[in-house]
Image (cartoon, rainbow, N blue to C red):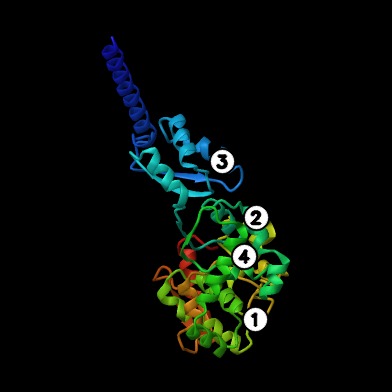
Amino acid sequence: MIKRVLLATILLGILVGGVFVAHFYRVFFASNTAFETPTKEVLFPSEDTKIAAYDTLSKVVKRIDLFQQAARRKGYHPIPGRFVLENGMNNNEIINRLRVDNAPLKLTFNNQKTLRHFAGFVANKIEADSTAIMQAFLDPDFLEKNGFNAENVFSICIPNTYEFFWNTSATQFRDRMLLEYNRFWTPKREAARKSMHLERTEVIALAAIVQLESYRKVERPTVAGVYLNRLRKRMRLQADPTIIYVLKRKANNFDLDIRRVLYADLKIKSPYNTYRNRGIPPGPITMPDVSAIEAVLFPEKHRYLYFVADPDRTGYHLFATSLAEHNKNKKRYTSWLRQKNIYR
């Protein structure tokens, strides 16, 4: 009888141990992902992190109850960030990943029309919303401390590819842009802009005009040379892209499609109207890329003062040193427009 009880006890122990081992395996080492793609991105916000994290995880793991058991035993507490899970991971691997591996993302930007457009673009990539990003850039203390104003602070956004954590705050993002802006100004670039007696923000503002005047990067140093020649002679820049900017700004609609600049438009009062005002506008009229900035810093040396679109080469221009020569080029261009029924 004693032998039977002992045997039963041993068998029961083995059974209980087996159940425990099997459960332990399911909790920690069995695959617990519910997605079919090779990887899955999960985002945990900075506020209500625990609630949001478990809500997100319930959609990407098969058994949230088993995950929660593993989390309790391992003392896991969700932290904000962006995490990348791999198909087939078990709870132990998932928790280890979520504890420390906040994965940075690559943020590439260029050709943003305004600071507001830029803030909206960035807000779709990181946690901070567009309003917070705008407020960070336009913060009076930040502007005063760093020598910017509401018109030219957009200058600090140098197009490139950067790494950010998804849970980067608006002020952290702004400060990173300022850091990268200062890094951009190498000794070589600083020497170039000082030799032209231009401020950094003036270089960026002029580069924005150059970019909109010519999308042919190879031609931008020539276009930049024209504007710099005009500045040296105290001539007005008379850049059509600034008039288009004025019209869009006046309409508060930067998505307007403006194909022609009318003579009446040249009379609009605005600090950005380069037909009325001498010098460089108070801020950039778009986000210039590095090629446009480099074109201003290292322009082609020539005597051209005028240019007009070349009807025989799309995207290129005809350059002239005198107004008489420019008028001939302009007549040739307007004749081409009439032939194409573009201009009457």
Between 243 and 196, the one lying in front of the other is 196
Task: Say above or below: 250 vs 194.
Answer: above
Are circles 1 and 2 on residues that touch, CB within 8 Å? no
Task: Say above or below: 72 vs 270.
Answer: above
Are circles 4 and 3 on residues that touch, CB within 8 Å? no
Q: Which residue is identified by label 4?
A: 245
Q: Give the residue type that dot 2 points to.
A: Ala
Callout 1: helix, strand or loop?
loop
What residue appears at the point 56 percent right and 52 percent down from the top-left corner? 123
Count residues near mark 2 (Cα–Cα under 10 Å), then give few for <14, some for 14-19, many for 20+. Answer: some
Where is residue 72? Give x, y as percent.
49, 37
Per the model, the C-alpha gap separating discs 1 and 3 is: 55 Å
What residue appears at the point 59 percent right and 61 percent down from the top-left corner? 172
Per the model, the C-alpha gap separating discs 4 and 1 is: 16 Å
Are circles 1 and 3 on residues that touch, CB within 8 Å? no
Tag nearer the camera, 2 or 3: 3
Report whether residue 60 is seen: yes
Where is residue 96? Give x, y as percent.
42, 46
Report whether residue 286 is seen: no
Q: Which residue is identified by label 3?
A: 50
Q: Which residue is identified by label 2?
A: 132
Q: Name the side, left or right, on which 273 lies relative to 52.
A: right
Q: Give the residue type that dot 1 points to.
A: Gly
Tag nearer the camera, 4 or 3: 3
Between 84 and 222, the one lying in front of the other is 84
Callout 4: helix, strand or loop?
helix
